[in-house]
């Protein structure tokens, strides 16, 4: 479709009538030969911004993606739309790679997917020089940021694209980047003159919740059973061992779960990832080695059993929930040991001083998000440069507001205990011993070290053990306590002096007694309810889609997304022409699946009623679809 109008490609291939947000301007920039740096949240339609320019410009669009394990699915999704796509990577047989390379050099592809490390190969560079390139798309561009949350060294070599092909337009895309990270992306990729497009980072359909960690696996089970029974989701753990234990526990308790971490062999990882993408209701328990590029639209929750290192990482990981725009949950269990562990990891890191300082700043921002008494969404958006946001009424701090109190005296008592142990006994202990001393507990350890003779023994009975643990956690977060040594003992910092000398007030958060439950279905987040017989029709369409996807060995969303099936079930089209007016039904899918869909509908509607007037069709990315509401507007290792 070289030379076609972008909106024509949108209608014919993707099945939508209009662009949304900044898509049209981004596409126009690339079609005209300009460069672009695009920041758009997961679910915002990033991929469409390079797919359509690659189709309408002469040549082949080269997509740089770090997601080798997902390239086949990306190509399958494009081919299902009628887009000529292929990939070249290390997983291919020689004959398949040869055929793809020949198709590229003959100009018989619209899109070619490559891994960033491939550009370090002389053979790959020679291949690119033999073909005509319409554009370069650098996906997951935040991977070039050396102090970012997901740095990939191979991305540093991508500046060669501008040096070797200075006249070919480039687009760098990411869902996660602060202002500083954006500048680093632009500098390292030679995109300082590129036009920048920054969409809102808000994901209104995701409810952010952070709960005090008590018994995390028990809390997780309760969360799944009461709110997300039989839903697809991702559970992130800090270590490989924790992944294995948690997956086993879930399976033992009747939850269909699979493990994923870098310690598993490649075949097992690939098989588990494939099952997660293709089956309904599976839970993937993983380290952060899993998830980038996963475009499964119906992930209903992302849970963290350990504290993420940074807000960027947290946002990237939680963003894998709710790509279809329907209500989803980002749930995190957070406790004192998380803070101690993360601080210790930074202090014992082999990184240089500047790197450790950057890691500490990332952690401080994440701790501030955990400890806030205001709307979490407002604070999250402010971190990415969106100020003056209104409380969302759909996060835990909005639904069940915590309180803050003047904890200066409590802080002084805690810091005094640390000080006296150090000065009078030349000893340092962890939080448990400090709390026992403050509560006046004559434990074996307290009596053995004669800590019951300290003047601070028993002076903290106004707070419970849980409240003291919260105080320790918050003093660590505020930099008023430090973690030292292999055993995570606590010591004072330079900032502690101002509290002990009564020069600084310390405000502490008091967690609410009752946490919010299921996600609130706000107008922006809720999909229109299916009425009457449409519910059964929708389920029959889903069953047909599942069987078709299994037969073709592709994820179900490659056939049609839930949002499209919902509209089909509601509108009840009787002809191919009527079906072709449904959002998400392009020409290729209409030709390939149209009659099958009508057959399913015929079984559901023995007495057909006149079809409803067609609704305007919105647009979305092929792998980042919102729900029907858009029609209205809206590894860590051991």
Image (cartoon, grey):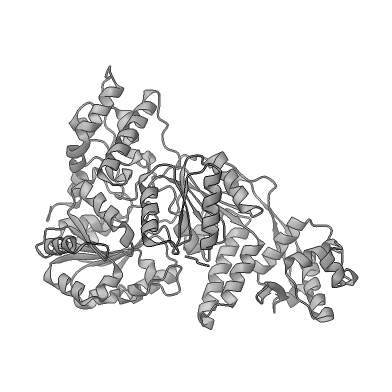
Residue 24 screen position, x and y as percent: 26, 54
Q: Is residue 573 visible?
A: no
In this rendering, would 192 be left or right of 11? right
Q: Can you say whether 489 is above or below 592 in the image?
A: below
Q: Quadrant of residue 485?
A: bottom right
Check the image and name the residue furthest to the top: 607
Q: Quadrant of residue 71?
A: bottom left
Check the image and name the residue furthest to the bottom: 352
Residue 346 screen position, x and y as percent: 57, 74
Residue 629 screen position, x and y as percent: 39, 40
Q: Residue at x 48, y 60 (%)?
A: 287
Q: Residue at x 34, y 50 (%)?
A: 624
Q: Is residue 537 visible?
A: yes
Q: Quick one: 224 or 397, which is closer to the camera?
A: 224
Residue 430 screen position, x and y as percent: 73, 69
Q: Residue at x 27, y 62 (%)?
A: 91
In this rendering, would 415 be left or right of 29? right
Q: Residue at x 66, y 53 (%)?
A: 214
The mark tally for this picture is: 0
In this rendering, would 195 be left or right of 368? left
Q: Quadrant of residue 190?
A: bottom left
Q: Quick one: 193 or 469, which is closer to the camera?
A: 469
Q: Can you say whether 128 is above or below 328 in the image?
A: below
Q: Can you say whether 167 is above or below 32 in the image?
A: below
């Amino acid at each position: 479709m070289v030379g076609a109008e972008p909106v024509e490609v949108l209608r014919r291939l993707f099945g939508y009538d209009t662009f949304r947000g900044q898509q049209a301007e981004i596409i126009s920039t690339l079609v005209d030969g300009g460069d672009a740096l695009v920041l758009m949240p997961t679910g915002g339609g990033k991929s469409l911004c390079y797919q359509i320019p690659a189709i309408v410009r002469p040549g082949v669009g080269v997509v740089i993606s770090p997601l080798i394990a997902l390239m086949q699915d990306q190509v399958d999704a494009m081919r299902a739309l009628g887009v000529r796509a292929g990939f070249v990577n290390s997983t291919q047989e020689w004959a398949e790679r040869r055929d793809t390379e020949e198709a590229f050099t003959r100009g018989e592809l619209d899109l070619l997917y490559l891994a960033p490390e491939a550009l370090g190969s002389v053979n790959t560079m020679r291949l690119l020089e033999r073909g005509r390139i319409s554009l370069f798309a650098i996906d997951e561009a935040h991977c070039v940021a050396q102090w970012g949350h997901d740095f990939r060294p191979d991305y540093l070599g991508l500046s060669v694209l501008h040096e070797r092909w200075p006249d070919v337009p480039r687009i760098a895309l990411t869902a996660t980047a602060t202002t500083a990270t954006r500048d680093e992306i632009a500098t390292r990729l030679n995109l300082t003159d590129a036009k920048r497009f920054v969409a809102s980072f808000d994901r209104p359909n995701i409810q952010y919740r952070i709960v005090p960690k008590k018994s995390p696996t028990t809390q997780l089970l309760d969360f799944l059973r009461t709110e997300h029974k039989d839903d697809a989701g991702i559970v992130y753990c800090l270590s490989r061992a924790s992944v294995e234990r948690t997956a086993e526990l879930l399976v033992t308790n009747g939850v269909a779960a699979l493990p994923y971490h870098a310690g598993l062999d490649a075949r097992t990882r690939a098989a588990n990832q494939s099952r997660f993408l293709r089956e309904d209701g599976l839970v993937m328990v993983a380290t952060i080695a899993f998830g980038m590029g996963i475009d499964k639209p119906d992930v209903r929750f992302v849970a963290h059993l350990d504290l993420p290192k940074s807000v960027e990482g947290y946002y990237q990981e939680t963003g894998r929930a709710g790509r279809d725009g329907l209500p989803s949950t980002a749930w995190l269990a957070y406790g004192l040991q998380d803070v101690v562990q993360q601080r210790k990891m930074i202090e014992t890191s082999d990184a240089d001083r500047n790197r450790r300082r950057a890691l500490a700043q990332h952690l401080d921002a994440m701790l501030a998000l955990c400890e806030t008494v205001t709307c979490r969404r407002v604070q999250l958006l402010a971190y990415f440069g969106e100020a003056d946001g209104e409380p969302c009424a759909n996060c835990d701090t909005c639904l069940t507001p915590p309180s803050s109190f003047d904890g200066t005296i409590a802080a002084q008592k805690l810091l005094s205990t640390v000080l006296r142990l150090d000065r009078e006994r030349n000893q340092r202990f962890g939080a448990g011993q400090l709390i026992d001393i403050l509560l006046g507990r004559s434990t074996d350890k307290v009596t053995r070290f004669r800590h019951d003779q300290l003047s601070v023994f028993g002076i903290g009975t106004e707070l419970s053990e849980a409240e003291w643990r919260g105080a320790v956690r918050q003093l660590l977060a505020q930099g008023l306590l430090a973690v030292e040594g292999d055993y995570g003992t606590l010591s004072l910092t330079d900032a502690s002096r101002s509290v002990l000398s009564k020069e600084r007030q310390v405000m502490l958060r008091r967690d609410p007694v009752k946490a919010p439950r299921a996600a609130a279905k706000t107008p922006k987040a809720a999909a229109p309810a299916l009425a009457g017989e449409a519910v059964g029709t929708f389920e029959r369409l889903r069953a047909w889609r599942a069987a078709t996807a299994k037969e073709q060995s592709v994820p179900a969303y490659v056939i049609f997304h839930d949002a499209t099936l919902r509209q089909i079930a509601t509108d009840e089209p009787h002809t191919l022409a009527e079906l072709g007016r449904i959002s998400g039904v392009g020409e290729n899918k209409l030709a390939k699946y149209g009659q099958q869909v009508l057959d399913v509908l015929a079984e559901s509607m023995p007495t057909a009623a006149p079809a409803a007037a067609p609704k305007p069709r919105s647009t979305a990315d092929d792998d980042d679809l919102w729900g029907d509401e858009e029609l209205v507007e809206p590894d860590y290792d051991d």
